Image (tube, rainbow, N blue to C red):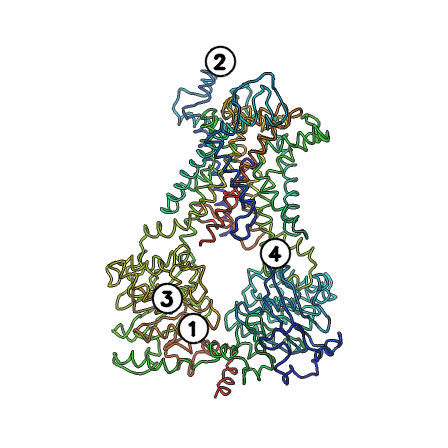
Amino acid sequence: MQHRFLVLKRVGQSLLVIALTYVFVFYVLFLLPGDPVKSRIENPQNPIPAEQAAAILAYYNLDRGGLEQFWISVTRLFQGDLGYSLGTGRPVAELIRDGFAETITLAGLALVLALALSLVIAATAVLAPWRWARGLAEKLPVIALATPGFLVGLVLLQVFAYQLGWFSSIRDEGFKSLVLPAVTLAIGVSAPIAQVLIHGLRHAYAEPFVAVLRAKGVPESRIFGEHVLKNASIPALTLFGLTVGELLAGSVIAEAVFNRSGLGFITEQAVRAQDGPVVQAIVMLVAVIFTLVNLLTDLLYPVIDRRITPRGGGPAAERPASTDQPRGVTA
Amino acid sequence: MTTSTSTALDTSTPAGPGHPGVPGPAAPSSRETLGGAGAGPDAPALRLEGLRIAYGHGGNAREVVHGVDLLLERGRTLALVGQSGSGKSTIAQAAGGLLPLSGHVTAGTIHVAGRDATAWTRSQWRSLRGTGVGYVPQDPLGSLDPLQTVGRQLGQALRLHTDATRATVAARAVELLEHVGIHDAARRLDAYPHELSGGQLQRVLIAIAIAGRPELLIADEPTSALDVTVQKRILDLLGELQRELGLAVLFITHDLALAAERSDALAVLNHGRLVDHGATRRVLAAPEDPYTRQLFADAPATSPDKYAERIEVLARRAGAGQDDAGARAGAAPDGSATGTGADAAVVVEGLVKHYGGAEGRPPAVDGVSFTLRRGSTHALVGESGSGKTTIARVVAGLEGFGAGRVVVDGRVLESRPQHANPYARQLQLVHQNPLAALDPKFSVRRSIEEPLRLHRTGPHAASDALRAGRVREVLERVALPAEVLDKRPRELSGGQRQRVAIARALVLAPDILVLDEPTSALDVTVQARVVELLFELREQQELSYLFITHDLSLVRQIADDVSVLERGRLVETGAVRRVFEDSGQAYTHRLIDSIPGRGAAAGQRKAQP
Amino acid sequence: MSAQTLPVTTSGRRSGTRIVLGDWVALAFLAVLLLAIAAPSWIAAYDPLEVSPGNTLLPPSPAHPFGTDYLGRDSLSRVVHGTGRTIGASLVAVSIGLGVGSLLGLVAAYFGRWVDAVVSRIVDVLLSIPGLLLSMVVVVALGFGTINAAIAVGIASVATFTRLMRSEVLTVRNLPFIEAAHHIGAGPGTVLFRHVLPNSYTAVLSMTALQFGSSILWIAALSFLGYGAPPPHPEWGLLVAEGREYIVSSPWLTLLPGLVIVLTVLSISRVAALVRSQQEALR
């Protein structure tokens, strides 16, 4: 009863955040002085035929008040109408549909790679019998976090595509052309996961229950796999939502470096053209995914760790500080 | 599993090799013959010879155990007693093959059931796990994997060390849990550790430790995280299991009285060296080392009458100014306050306190009444959840309350206190953990001076010079050297920190101190010094103490009156002597029975003259 | 991607407060950067905008340690002259994040109730959009340019500081020594300024240093995508982007400016960790 109430409250909170985010993005993109629609129409270098300009003006209702514009935009949203790209004139929904699959494939592969990579690095940093290996594994995430994603991509491209020729730099060779951008993304997002895992593993190994397991005669490999790793993964779980968000945002750069044509590329072009409707739609899509993944992890928590009850909504004050931390630190 | 025929410990040779302070590198040859006995049935359960253990490597190595010899015969209990930093837990870990990787044996040997385990790796140790050595840890709450059910963790032990199969393991686990005294065992199998109490968890851990029927059980402070009544039941259980299974027990504890009560042989450790080692009776009757004697004198359980005379004198002085001069018999035995007259420092009547939002839960404090007489020490005693700390916080004005009346120094408290306490001159609270209660960025000087700066109208606060003088005066009263003034709390020892906290409380010269477990985090010798200080302060000026504690032996030693609390309710209140000698309450009796080492204390007293 | 993430724990665990060789290297590198900002011509011999058609795409040599680009401009000079612009933009970004963010956090923690609720919703919204995308939204609204990119990055880092400040103040305020301060008679203002803030600023300070490193990466990313300074102005991210066309034949044009970015961020996080460990030793 109490439980169900908390879950509902948490779901409600997520919906509220999504709604508020929509308001925020709409306001920033369409109501601030540098209105992209207006500047698109008034752009002297790229004149638009008068009747087309009139059509755009009519569609975006620039002559009406801000509240009314917002209301029209919300109404259209619920009718599945995301508007038209100012740059290409195509419907925004169609653009997104075209890029979505490519980016999701990329992000999915990158996620798998990132999890594997962070696990290997964290295990090495904590368990390797050699001091130098532990030190190196601990330094790698620090270096990765200090390296811009585009540089990672360019180095990979230079070494593995141009020098060694192992992977393709051309975007239409299926899996072969997917690997390098995925690795680029994975290196970036794996660093914080590895750091949280390293910390979690050390913390878990210091727990008294490990001594009890040893005293019980449980082999070290099982202590790691069945007990320590699971306990260490719980703090890393808070990073999951963040990681998904970073993968989607990072695809802008990965797709730019590797000349791919997914959502990231569309975003990059849209920002360059100051194409407000497209930017708005993509940002909202990412925000919804991001918020839902965070909701999901929050709801999964109590299932994985019985000590935790679902987080109530309301001011963030009600959330326990410890589980509240990681998402913010890395955002 | 038969008990060894050899008698107890080497009582005849209390001054064994490598004895007190002599860091002999290895045992002399007289022991060598024993060492060669091999893994026969007569081999002692555990033998340590010249054991030295260090943490770290190379230049950073720090030796914490400096040549320790111990012998534990089969079926016996050897208690290893020491304060924090004595190396007792390190020895326990080494004997159980549980040293962290940074720790290692640098000299000497460890024989477990006759087998030389000194240089064993973790995987070699596994041959002894479960069936050879069992381990009961210190902190039951953190000692089970929080993500797995109790049943699964117990089943793991059974599957590793017995012929239990997937099919039979559940039945065996139930059996074992019942054996260690867990009710409704079948249902408990599906519980997660956080759903059980500390005492229940410790029973589960004992079940895990004995699942493989080991010969040696290493119990590392198995009850120090538990309430006294639970402690007694857990130790009783360990005793029963020991007799039943013929276990040898290495019992690590900081509590000398407890060790004396529960062991055949006793070893006292000080800074990594054995200072006393022999049959418990012998050590009790004639402690060889001054350190052991000091421990006996400092532990309240073994020296209950230490302050009897000073209490009499103080009580007479307090009584002289009042109507009735009866020593240690002030509060009415029925617990109702005798009035709010000038003789009462604090009067609490029918106090009720609920914590917000918890509807169905019983109140934290439920109708408690007692009186702190002026110039006396009134102890509030109870186990965790008894509400004693809540009462202290209400009296100190840190928390509001629901119903009842609280009068401090003749002033009736509002049920919702002000944020900033305007009555700091009347009453001050001393927190349990001084490190947490002192601002880490403040020097000792600033911490003690702050109350004076906040209350500038006082006699000592008007000018910088007066304040500095007052700070030094108070520092002297708590017997701290002037050097500490510019240090930060982190740079002080635990005892020093508590003295700073007391100095800060005293600087405004209040009449009443509320002391919330002021010594519970301290080692027994440090605790004794702080208690001594509290007496000295009372002798210098009239002070009334409301003393919160879970330690009944301390109450008996220092308090005039006592209120016994159980789950937020008052069990009884009255003079200490009456409550201890003539209580009609079953719960009070249970608490008193749980005070460890009452026999030991008697033995001590007989031995002393 | 690393451009938007902030190290959770910086250069691993430091053992003790000793200043080791790595710290000196980091400090020395930052000193060189300061020099590059204060007196770029003193380090770099060439005009960063001077085109030299005869000297295009030269490999690194004593005369041109970082080589020359497709217009024959000295790459080292462009990096050195770009330092001020990139670091300056990061400082602007961090100042916005720190100023607005910690003020919001402090207000939320201090007043609580509906103020806290409103601030928390603002934080939720800002955090629901990944940082890089959020700064892109702001760039779309404000237009391109170094300052606009800096403002965008600043706005995107507000939430981090708000949360940190708020949780630090709330955490510290619940510590027993704060209660002890009230108990000896201190009022809310005294407690806030004498006890709470002095015990909160260490965390905020080290977050500021970390966020400074992140801002450099972030601004470099925006300028790499072409939303920052317009060419031919040298800006670190832009230099990498310009070298990108010649990555096969002249990889140093991308790698060396990239390396400067990496070393800068590493040095900052190293020094931040050093400062923090010194601070903690004082407590």
Mark 1 → mark 4, Cα distance in angstroms: 37 Å
Kind of residue at badge 4? Tyr
For disc 4, the marked residue is A205
Chain for mark 4? A
- Residue B111 x %, y %: 70, 72
Residue at numbered disc 2? A45
Which is in the foreground here, disc 4 or disc 3?
3
* Cα–Cα span, label 2 and label 3: 79 Å
Tell me the element at label 3: helix
Viewer-side residue, A7 vs C234:
C234
Could you say whether the residue bearing mark 4 is in a helix, strand or loop? helix
Say which label, 1 or 3, has the lower sequence index: 3
Marks 2 and 4 on same chain: yes
Residue receiving disc 1? B529
x, y percentage for residue A138? 61, 46
- Residue at the image position 35 percent from the left and 46 percent from the top: C111
Judge depth for marks 2 and 1 and give the one in front. Answer: 1
Q: Are marks 1 and 3 in contact (CB under 8 Å)?
A: no
Q: Specify few, some or many for label 2: CA neighbours under 10 Å numbering under 14, 14-19, or 20 or more.
A: few
Q: Residue at x 46, y 13 (%)?
A: A44
Tag 3 subunit: B
Q: Earlier in the sequence, mark 2 or mark 4?
A: 2
Which residue does the numbered mark 3 point to in the structure image? B502
Mark 4: give few (<14), some (14-19) or many (20+) Cα within 10 Å: some
